[in-house]
Amino acid sequence: MLKTIMLGAALAAMVTGCADMNQRQRNTAIGAGAGAVLGSVLTNGDSLGTLGGAAVGGIIGHQTR
């Protein structure tokens, strides 16, 4: 439960920090956040799964226009 709250707070802080980013940077940040959540869910909170999901999500977000 605490991990979920911390992850939600981190995502909220990240989204508010996107105001002065260009579109590619914003897509990278959103992809990394979504990937981290998905990686955490799929691996039952495993740190490596969360980091791997964030990395893959960031790459996909960066390539998206």
Image (spheres, rainbow, N blue to C red):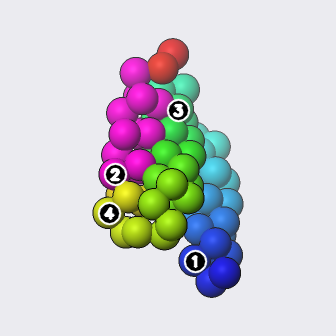
Q: Circle 2 sits on which residue? A: 52
Marking on residue 3? 1
Q: Nearer the viewer, mark 3 or mark 4?
A: 4
Disc 1 to disc 3, how far (Cα)? Answer: 24 Å
**Which is in the foreground here, disc 1 or disc 3?**
1
Prevailing secondary structure class for the magenta stretch in the rendered image = helix
Residue drawn at point x = 57 percent, y = 77 percent: 3
- Amino acid carrying mark 1 in the image: Lys
Classify mark 3: residues with Cα within 10 Å, few (<14), some (14-19) or many (20+): many
Q: Which residue in the protein does label 4 denote? A: 48
Proximity of marks 1 and 4: CB atoms separated by less than 8 Å: no
Decide if residue 41 is on the left or right side of residue 60.
right
Instruction: Tell me the quarter of the picture where residue 48 sits.
Output: bottom left
Q: Residues within 10 Å of mark 2 (few under 14, many from 20)?
A: some
Q: CA distance from mark 3 to mark 4?
A: 22 Å
Identify whether 3 is placed above or below 60.
below
The residue depicted at 41 percent of the width and 69 percent of the height is 46
Residue 25 numbered tag: none
The alpha-carbon separation of the residues under discs 2 and 1 comes to 17 Å
Magenta residues, start to end: 52-63
